[in-house]
Image (cartoon, grey):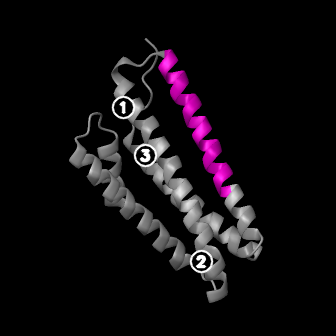
């Protein structure tokens, strides 16, 4: 999964990708989603009944999560494109967008968890949250390690 993440991040951070490269990014993103789903499946330890209730909600979550990560990748792309000519105004915009994205990501997980609590034991929902948070943290750590710090004001 690490190599897939590195490839996706490298490709999405480069401005002006060709159409064939955009197709590759989408393929890599779908591989990441499949890997994440496999990790969730391997770690949830659900009964058949719980699985029937869980997976439709997970699919809904995964679709919304994809849109949020696409937005985050857009912020990263804008950051990469502005890096050499960074202004305080652009930095402020990127920061506001990143904060909003973080809030949306948290709200998605909270709303999904509330739906899950209606049909699953709290321990299963908490386990799902822990798995998702660990995966998100791994991705965020990889992103942080690949991105240079914001340039200092001139």
* Residue 94 shown in magenta: yes
Q: In this view, which residue lies farthest toward the bottom?
A: 48
Residue located at (55% from left, 36% from top): 98
Most extreme residue toward the top, as rendered?
154
Q: Nearer the viewer, mark 3 or mark 1?
A: 1
Q: Which quadrant of the view contains residue 65?
A: bottom right
Which part of the image, by quadrant, shows the N terminus?
A: bottom left
Crowding at mark 3 (Cα within 10 Å: few <14, some 14-19, many 20+) = some
Q: Which mark is residue 80?
A: 1
In the drawing, does residue 38 fall left or right of residue 17? right
Task: Give the left or right position of residue 125, taking residue 13 as reference.
Answer: right
**101 vs 140: above or below:** above
**Earlier sequence position, callout 1 versus callout 2:** 2
In this figure, which residue is indicated by the disc labeled 3?
A: 143
Secondary structure under the numbered disc 3 in the rendered image: helix
Q: Nearer the viewer, residue 19 or 43?
A: 19
The magenta span reads 88-109
Within 10 Å of the Cα at label 2, are there few (<14), some (14-19), or many (20+) other Cα atoms?
some
Q: Position of residue 40 (x, y in %)?
A: 53, 72
Can you tell which mark lies on residue 119?
none
Please tell me whether the stretch drawn in magenta is mainly helix, strand or loop: helix
Mark 1 is surrounded, within 10 Å at the Cα level, by few (under 14), some (14 to 19) or many (20 or more) other residues, namely some
Distance in Å between CA atoms under marks 1 and 2: 37 Å
Is residue 1 shown to the viewer in this render?
Answer: no
- Res 31 seen here: yes
Q: Quadrant of residue 121?
A: bottom right
The residue indicated by pointer 2 is: 44
SS label for mark 1: helix
Q: How far is disc 3 from disc 1 in space, using C-alphas? A: 12 Å
């Amino acid at each position: 999964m690490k190599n897939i993440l590195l490839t996706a991040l490298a490709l999405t951070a480069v401005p002006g990708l060709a159409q064939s490269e955009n197709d590759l990014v989408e393929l890599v993103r779908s591989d990441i989603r499949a890997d994440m789903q496999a990790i969730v499946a391997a770690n949830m330890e659900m009964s058949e009944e719980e699985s029937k209730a869980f997976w439709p909600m997970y699919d809904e979550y995964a679709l919304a999560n994809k849109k949020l990560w696409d937005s985050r990748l857009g912020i990263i792309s804008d950051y990469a494109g502005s890096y050499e000519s960074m202004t305080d105004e652009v930095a402020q915009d990127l920061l506001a967008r990143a904060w909003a994205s973080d809030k949306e990501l948290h709200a998605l997980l909270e709303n999904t968890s509330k739906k899950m609590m209606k049909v699953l034991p709290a321990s299963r929902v908490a386990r799902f949250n822990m798995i998702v948070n660990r995966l998100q943290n791994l991705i965020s750590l990889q992103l942080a390690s690949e991105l240079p710090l914001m340039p200092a004001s001139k």
